Amino acid sequence: GTNLFEWGEYKEAEQVLKQCVESMNANEKSSDNEKFQALFTLAALDRAQGKYDEAKALYLEALKTAKKMGEESEHVDLSIVNSIAGYAEILRKAGDLWQAEALHKKVRGMLLKANSEDANDKDIELQLAVSHTQLGCTVFDLKKYEEALYEHQSALQIRLEKLEFNDALVSESFNYCAETLCAMGHGAKALPLSMHAVDVRKKEFGSSHPAYAHALCVLAQVYNGVGRSRDALPLIETCMKICETAFQKKNHANIIPNLLVYGDILTCVGEPQKALETFRRAEEIHKSNFKPGQKDFQLESCEQKIEKASEDIRKAEHNKPSAAIKNLSPDNGGMVQSGGQPVIVFTDVGKDVDDVFALVVLASLRRMFILNPLAVIATLSPQDERARLARVLLDSLGLPDVPVGIGTDGGSKDLVELHCFDNEQNLLNLPHGIILIRRLLKEAEPKSITLLCLANLKDISELIVKQPELFSEKIKNVVIMGGASYSEATERLEPDETAYNNNCDPAAARMVYLECQKLKIPTTTISRSAAYDCPFAISKLNNLHLKCNHLLASEIYQANTKAILTLWNKVNLPAWNPGRGRLPPRCDRDWFCKFFRVTIDDEAEPLASDGWLRSANIYLYDALATLNCVEAYQELYFGHKGHVVNGTLHKLIERIAFKDGLAAEIDGMLHEAFRLAMEGAFAKIKVENSDTDTNSSDKKAEKSKNGERNGKSSENAQ
């Protein structure tokens, strides 16, 4: 019965648990402990289904049984604690928030006493985390958001100490932290936490469980809060479908908060009529589930939203669009306001983990106000998948306002090999890169923007052909990861066509170099030999994986391990074997050992856990190129050859001047980027004052959602 409940099979769970209780009541020899467990679980199941009166009666019966069990004990009985907490949750669900808060605080005191009696008891500490969570949800409903965040952060700290990072209960705490931060007006801080929760819950519970639906609803709220309502819409619609199927009762009370979020998003995407219908349904469900006086704050919220949606419709009929309508995604254009050198990045992210490192370094430089990424353009077929991956990666790093565009096919047909998050990224709305770039360049100051190319040069060549005046007028310089050399015969730079990025589309590479030299636009080219000068130990990836509470750090480590072992298998195949793919004959076992700087026993079959893999090195080509967008880093760490063509200096980076210092600098940036992305889960954060900016659609969206509550997941019952 308990397992069926946790799997979301409510109807079958109810039948089994009722049979358990009836059997125990009929048998005088039944143990009180077993009876308590059956009563408690059945009460939690009724609570999850919105049967509050039935749940109250069962919790009270469970409490009597628990008291009987603990009569002879001087210590705190956890059965009694759980019964009181369960009863308090029923009061919260029914809207009696002040009494629920008082009972949850009583439970907190009992658990603290129990913990002092039996220090370091894992079960008691995890129960204390549940108490923090339940009290956090209660004070959230009372709109005490800072207090709620403290409680959820406290629960998260305990769970991270006692459980695995990808445990379902850890994801629950991330989810509630994200929801609270969103209500406080900190959507960007909430987004990485919410994405973690969605990723873990889908893996743990499956895609039809209410716990996953709740995580999707919070993610939809967060996207709506950061101004990306069109990305939020498919998420909340998926959430609604799951809930309509999972709950036995058609108009379940737990659907109301989801409907209110759905209506808010519909309002923001310009569908006031559909929003009005959604709010009215929420009101009807409330009236059918609650008695007069119960949960009045929720009914009042429904009524206010109905009135606002009706007003929007009236204004639309008189051609006066509401300020709340058209909450557009920042991916649809607009200069990102931030300090630092403006830069547009071209990446083939998904080909290997190196591109991901570059985006992490970019996030760190953005937070230091050194670089201001105006857009990231994903290139190389299948470019739409790469673009969605780039969007998810930037969101996970707390950069939801950096637009992502879909670039060209890059002249190649490589497959995407790395997907770091499974966050419904196929539903994200993204513009075409050339349209996005044109908008950004039109808004930019003359000679102000750096182009950073970490991939093929086809997109930049297309920009030169289609927007020659904008390219000439607005581009300050171009930084290229690839390779080039100075030709004495032609007296100009020529691209190295053996470099992978140049080789994808050699004609595009030649055109970009030629036009930059003609138009007197400085270039900086980083060759792969510079990266070989600065190996990055895989052991540092393992430290990231272990120390940073961020799924992307773990994904990078796992993806890199998989890639190296796949390459190892390929180099052991004979040169004629098609399983080697495009790997050249020179890439054999000896090449592998020299390239990764490892020693492998010829007789051994290396596995991921072997010492050779932990001692191997990788090369962060694209991260080094990203640092070359900053003149101070370039002067400090890189040695370059300069060639003056047409009166303009062009730099070739072929070596590293300060190797150890550079590796440490990058390692520090990676740690800092992940730490700051997860800041919302650990730092003390104040509620943002949204009243000071009445013109901000983002803050209006946040303000309209303050106090709105999501349906809770079933694991709170544990």
Image (tube, rainbow, N blue to C red):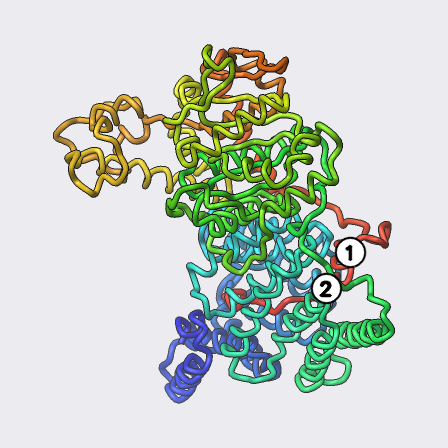
What x and y, as percent, mark residue 670? 52, 32
Can residue 363 be seen at all in this image of the molecule?
Answer: yes
Residue 553 in percent (x, y) is at 46, 40
Circle 2 Cα neighbour tier, 10 Å, few/some/many (<14 / 14–19 / ≥20): many
Badge 2 vs badge 1, beta-carbon distance below 8 Å: yes
Residue 659 visible: no
Residue occupying the far bottom of the picture:
26
Vertical order, 462 against 216 (above or below)? above
For image coordinates 80% across by 53% down, the residue present is 696
Q: What residue type is labelled 1?
A: Ser
Tell me the amino acid under the disc marked 2: Cys
Labels 2 and 1: the sequence-earlier one: 2
Report the front residue among 80 and 314. Answer: 314
Number of numbered discs visible in the structure rendering:
2
Please tell me which residue is depicted at 81% across the width and 50% down the height of the picture.
689
Secondary structure beneath disc 2? helix
Give the quadrant of the N terminus: bottom left
Q: Residue at x 61, y 73 (%)?
A: 87
Q: In which quarter of the image is residue 244?
A: bottom right
Q: In this view, does 665 lie above or below 407?
A: above
Q: Residue at x 39, y 76 (%)?
A: 31
Q: Camera-side residue: 695 or 52?
A: 695
Residue 450 horizontal/vertical position (percent): 63, 29
Q: Residues within 10 Å of mark 1 (few under 14, many from 20)?
A: many
Task: Identify the residue under disc 2.
Answer: 268
**Is 434 situated above or below 240?**
above
Q: In 3D space, how far apart are the residues under numbered discs 2 and 1 (Cα atoms)?
A: 9 Å
The quarter of the picture where residue 713 lies is bottom right
**Residue 697, disc:** 1
Residue in front for this viewpoint, 397 or 285: 397
